[in-house]
Amino acid sequence: MSSTFVQPYLFFGGRCQEAIDFYTATIGAKTDRVILFKDSPEPVPPGQLSPGFENKVMHAAFRIGDTLLMASDGCTTDTGFKGFSLSLSLPNEAETDRVFALLSKDGSVQMPLTKTFWSPRFGMLTDKFGVEWMVSVADTAAK
């Protein structure tokens, strides 16, 4: 059995704790660990952090369902989630509708929820942190 796997590591440019709190409230994320820069066992090299980042998240791990995501504020306020989307599968249409509405609040919808040949509900959005999501009903074919 292989122990190789890929995990998303997201950089929120100073808004990591806010993002974790948002994902906890909207999709039931569970926080495993949060380490602030000021609590690092090794000091951050001088000049690496933006001013005020001592109290920001150096490393966090949180779960959405069975998936572990890692995150940080990074060292600057620069962010840019480009070239990928997180695909979120939910158990039914009602939950898909609810979560899609919450994630897209203060963000933008690229494709409203609709029936597709692979799912009775599928849509794409960018949340208020700039993370792109594809949201759908899990493991079911559209009828």
Image (cartoon, rainbow, N blue to C red):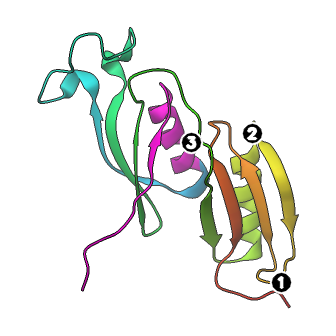
Looking at the rendered image, the disc whose residue lies closer to the viewer, 2 or 3, is: 2
Please give the label number shown on residue 117: 1
- Residue 96 drawn at (x, y percent): 72, 67
Please give the label number shown on residue 22: 3
Distance, label 1 to label 3, CA atoms, is 31 Å
Q: Earlier in the sequence, mark 2 or mark 3?
A: 3
The quadrant of the rendering that contains the C terminus is bottom right
At label 1, which amino acid type do we have? Phe
Residue 17 lies in the magenta stretch: yes
Q: Earlier in the sequence, mark 1 or mark 3?
A: 3
- Residue 48 drawn at (x, y percent): 30, 17
Q: Residues within 10 Å of mark 3 (few under 14, many from 20)?
A: some
Looking at the rendered image, the disc whose residue lies closer to the viewer, 2 or 1, is: 1
- Residue 23 drawn at (x, y percent): 55, 48
Task: State whether residue 40 is above or below residue 52.
Answer: below
Distance, label 2 to label 3, CA atoms, is 12 Å
